[in-house]
Image: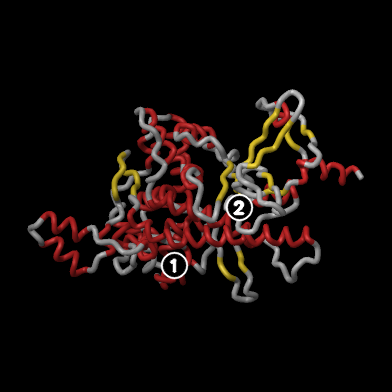
C-alpha cells in the first residue's frame, strides 16, 4: 500500500511554488491538485497557471475544440524522466536523450584538469546526448580527461600567460583518444542493453521497450556520426613537443606520391612547393600510415619471430619496435619516426624539481630495462637487434617517444571462435 501511495504522489504531485506563485527551494513540499492532475502531458503545449491567495487556475494557450482532450505540459522532459516519473514515453520525443556522466576524480591530474575545465567555462560532468548531435561541452571535456601530464603542463603554461584554454584544436593524438573513449563508453552501454525477444504483454513493459529502443537509436546514430566524422581528422594539427616548443612533426608529404614529392622538391615556385607538400588523404589513410600498434608487428616478420620467443612487457615491445622502424626504411612509418630523431622528452624542459626528479627515476628504470635485454637480444638475434641501433641512448629516446605519444584506448574486437564481442 505504501509503494502504491508513493507512486501516486510522485506521478501526480505539483510543486508548492506552483500554488504560492513564488520560486521554490530544492526541498520544497509537493502538493496534489485533484482533477488538474488528471491531464496528460503533451510536449510544446502552451499553458499558464494563475494563482492567488484562494484559488489556482489552469489556462490553455490555444482554443480547445469540443470533445477534444485538455492536456498539460509537464515541462521539457526526456523519455527517461517521463518513464521514471510518470510511467510512460512519447514516441519520437524530440527531448529524448542518453545521459552520460563523466568522472575523472581518480585521475592524478584531477585538480589541474578541473582548473582547465573551469577556465574553459565547463562546470558540469553531466551531458545529454540527443539524436541531433553531441552536446557542446562533451568532446572538449573528454579532450581534457585524456590529456597526459605533458599535455596538462603546456596548457597550464599557456594559462599562466593569460591565455584561455582552447579545447577545440588540441591535435590529432588527443582527438583520437577522446573519440575512442567516447565510442567505447557508448558501445559498452549499447552492448549492455538486453535484446527483446517478444513484445511485453503489459503496458508498462511496452513503454519500457519504447524507451530502450529510443536509447539504442541515439547510441547507434551517435556512433555512426563519430565514424563519419573521422574524415575530418586529417585537418587537425599533429603537434608534439620538441625542446619545449610545439612543432608539426608528422611529415604531410608522407601522404603524397614519390613523384609529387620530387616535383615539390625541385620546383622553383615556393607557392607550388607548399601546395604540393600539403596534399593529404582521408584520416583513415593517415592513421594507417602513422599509428603503430602491436597488431602491426606483422609488417616486420623478423621482429615478430624474434619477440615471440622471449617474454617482454608490452610497453617495451613498442619501444623496441620504434627503434626497428627507425632502422628499416621499408617499414611504412619510417618517415614519420625519422622526423622525431631530434625529439627530447618534454619533462626535460620542466622547471619543477619534483617533475625533473620523476623524469630521472623513469629514465633510470628504462635504463635498467635496456640492460636486462641487451646484449642478450643482440647475441640471439643479431640481424634484428644490431647493437649500433639499440644503444642505451637510442633506447631512452624511443622510450620518451612512446611515453609522450602513446594512445591508451579501449580495444574492441570480435572473437572469431564464438562471434562474441570482446573488449
Residue found farthest to the left = 268
Q: Earlier in the sequence, mark 2 or mark 1?
A: 2
Dot 1 alpha-carbon crowd within 10 angstroms: few under 14, some 14 to 19, many 20 or more? some
Q: Position of residue 348 (x, y in %)?
A: 37, 38
In the image, taking residue 269 as reference, residue 44 lies left or right, namely: right
Judging depth in this view, the residue of 97 and 325 nearest the camera is 97
Which numbered marker is on residue 96?
A: 2
Count of all numbered marks drawn on residues in the image: 2
In the image, taking residue 5 as reference, residue 254 lies left or right, namely: left
Q: Position of residue 28 (x, y in %)?
A: 74, 29
**Residue under label 1:** 297
Residue found farthest to the right = 1
Q: Is residue 146 visible?
A: no
Q: Position of residue 285 (x, y in %)?
A: 36, 65
Q: Residue at x 74, y 46 (%)?
A: 39
Q: Residue at x 14, y 65 (%)?
A: 263
In the image, taking residue 30 as reference, residue 281 lies left or right, namely: left
Quadrant placement of the C terminus: bottom right
Q: Residue at x 7, y 58 (%)?
A: 268
Judging depth in this view, the residue of 275 and 151 nearest the camera is 275
Q: Secondary structure at mark 1?
A: helix
Q: Position of residue 352 (x, y in %)?
A: 42, 30
Quadrant placement of the N terminus: top right
Judging depth in this view, the residue of 211 and 274 nearest the camera is 211
Q: Secondary structure at mark 2?
A: loop
The reply to whether dot 2 and dot 1 touch (C-beta < 8 Å) is: no
Q: Residue at x 53, y 33 (%)?
A: 111
| Distance Cα–Cα, label 2 vs label 1 | 45 Å
Dot 2 alpha-carbon crowd within 10 angstroms: few under 14, some 14 to 19, many 20 or more? many
Amino acid at each position: 500500500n505504501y509503494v502504491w501511495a508513493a507512486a501516486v504522489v510522485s506521478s501526480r504531485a505539483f510543486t508548492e511554488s506552483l500554488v504560492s506563485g513564488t520560486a521554490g527551494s530544492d526541498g520544497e513540499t509537493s502538493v496534489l491538485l485533484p482533477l488538474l492532475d488528471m491531464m496528460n502531458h503533451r510536449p510544446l503545449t502552451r499553458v499558464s497557471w494563475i494563482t492567488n491567495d484562494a484559488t489556482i487556475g489552469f489556462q490553455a494557450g490555444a482554443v480547445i475544440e469540443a470533445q477534444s482532450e485538455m492536456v498539460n505540459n509537464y515541462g521539457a522532459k526526456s523519455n527517461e524522466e517521463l518513464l521514471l516519473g510518470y510511467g510512460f514515453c512519447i514516441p519520437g520525443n524530440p527531448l529524448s536523450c542518453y545521459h552520460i556522466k563523466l568522472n575523472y576524480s581518480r585521475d592524478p591530474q584531477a585538480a589541474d584538469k578541473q582548473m582547465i575545465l573551469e577556465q574553459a567555462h565547463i562546470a558540469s560532468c553531466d551531458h545529454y546526448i540527443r539524436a541531433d548531435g553531441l552536446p557542446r561541452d562533451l568532446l572538449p571535456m573528454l579532450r581534457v580527461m585524456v590529456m597526459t601530464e605533458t599535455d596538462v603542463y603546456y596548457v597550464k603554461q599557456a594559462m599562466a600567460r593569460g591565455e584561455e584554454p582552447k579545447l577545440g584544436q588540441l591535435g590529432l593524438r588527443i582527438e583520437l583518444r577522446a573519440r575512442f573513449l567516447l565510442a567505447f563508453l557508448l558501445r559498452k552501454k549499447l552492448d549492455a542493453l538486453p535484446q527483446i525477444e517478444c513484445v511485453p504483454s503489459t503496458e508498462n513493459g511496452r513503454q519500457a521497450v519504447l524507451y530502450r529502443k529510443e536509447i539504442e537509436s541515439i547510441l547507434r546514430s551517435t556512433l555512426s556520426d563519430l565514424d563519419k566524422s573521422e574524415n575530418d581528422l586529417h585537418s587537425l594539427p599533429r603537434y608534439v613537443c620538441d625542446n619545449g616548443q610545439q612543432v608539426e612533426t608528422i611529415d604531410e608529404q608522407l601522404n603524397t606520391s614519390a613523384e609529387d614529392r620530387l616535383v615539390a622538391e625541385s620546383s622553383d615556385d615556393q607557392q607550388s612547393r607548399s601546395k604540393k607538400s600539403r596534399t593529404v588523404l582521408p584520416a583513415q589513410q593517415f592513421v594507417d600510415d602513422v599509428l603503430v600498434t602491436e597488431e602491426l608487428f606483422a609488417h616486420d616478420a623478423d621482429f615478430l619471430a624474434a619477440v615471440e620467443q622471449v617474454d617482454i612487457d608490452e610497453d617495451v615491445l613498442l619501444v623496441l619496435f620504434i627503434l626497428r622502424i627507425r632502422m628499416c626504411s621499408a617499414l611504412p612509418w619510417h618517415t614519420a619516426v625519422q622526423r622525431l630523431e631530434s625529439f627530447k622528452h618534454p619533462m626535460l624542459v620542466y622547471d619543477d624539481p619534483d617533475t625533473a626528479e620523476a623524469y630521472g627515476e623513469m629514465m633510470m628504470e628504462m635504463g635498467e630495462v635496456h640492460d636486462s635485454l641487451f646484449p642478450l637480444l643482440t647475441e640471439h638475434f643479431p640481424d634484428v637487434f644490431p647493437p649500433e641501433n639499440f644503444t642505451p641512448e637510442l633506447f631512452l629516446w624511443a622510450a620518451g617517444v612512446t611515453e609522450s605519444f602513446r594512445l591508451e584506448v579501449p580495444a574492441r574486437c570480435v572473437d572469431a571462435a564464438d562471434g562474441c564481442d570482446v573488449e
